[in-house]
Image: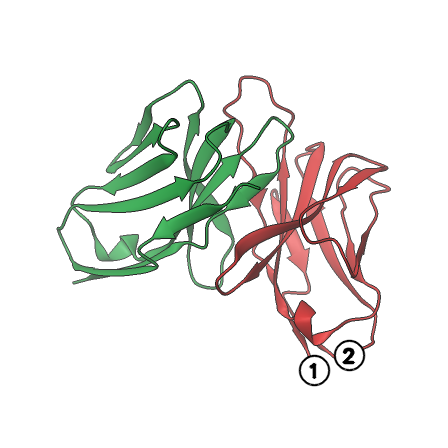
Chain colours: A red, B green
Amino acid sequence: DAGITQSPRYKITETGRQVTLMCHQTWSHSYMFWYRQDLGHGLRLIYYSAAADITDKGEVPDGYVVSRSKTENFPLTLESATRSQTSVYFCASRPPLSGGGETQYFGPGTRLLVL
Amino acid sequence: KQEVTQIPAALSVPEGENLVLNCSFTDSAIYNLQWFRQDPGKGLTSLLLIQSSQREQTSGRLNASLDKSSGRSTLYIAASQPGDSATYLCAVWMDSSYKLIFGSGTRLLVRP
């Protein structure tokens, strides 16, 4: 299916465990993003990537690791999950700017609960 | 540091009403401003994007305006319908780096 997908959609884990959230897009967009959404905070950028093998920190990167070996995939890893990382995680992608009117396309989200 | 605020946090209106959602930002040097819709348990869908050189954008019953100098944007929804019930998020681009800064959203309920 064309678009952007995330897996798993729901995940329960325990404090201290490593968790990887997957994101896959079929458009070959160069830019990809990870956000977390918490009550009262809206969406906050965790990491973003401008192309394969190019990543950079966003607003709240601590405790997270990303990689981008292929253009279409952008996994997010919580190396040692903490309760404060309980959240809804959204992946997004977008093409490079051409006329300034481009938008980001969002995946359906992954709900993560850390016990 | 840019801060984006949306007021009200929640809104309940009867069907057919025209309504206005507000978004304010503290740093007027924005690149673009974008409005999104989020349905429960779903991702975000872009509604309107206003480039910094524009004053407004329209799509169907939706109209978004931008006043950079005052740090404000409004989303106007005409003749609201129950299907408009969702959370509406405002986001600003500070530059062409594609990083969005979001407000916390307005949760809209349109009652039949």
**Residue A12 shown left or right of residue B40 in the figure:** right
Callout 1: residue from which chain? Answer: A
Callout 2: residue from which chain? Answer: A
Query: What mark, if any, has residue A115 been given in the picture?
Result: 1
Residue type marked 1: Leu
Residue type marked 2: Thr
Which quadrant: the C terminus of chain B? bottom left
The quadrant in which residue A79 appears is bottom right
Of labels 2 and 1, earlier in sequence is: 2
Residue A76 visible? The answer is yes
Cβ atoms at labels 2 and 1 below 8 Å apart: yes
**Residue B20 shown left or right of residue A47 in the figure:** left
**Residue B28 shown left or right of residue A84 in the figure:** left
The residue that disc 2 covers is A15
Where B21 falls versus A28 (above or below)? below
The quadrant in which residue B110 appears is bottom left
Q: Nearer the viewer, residue B107 or B41?
A: B107
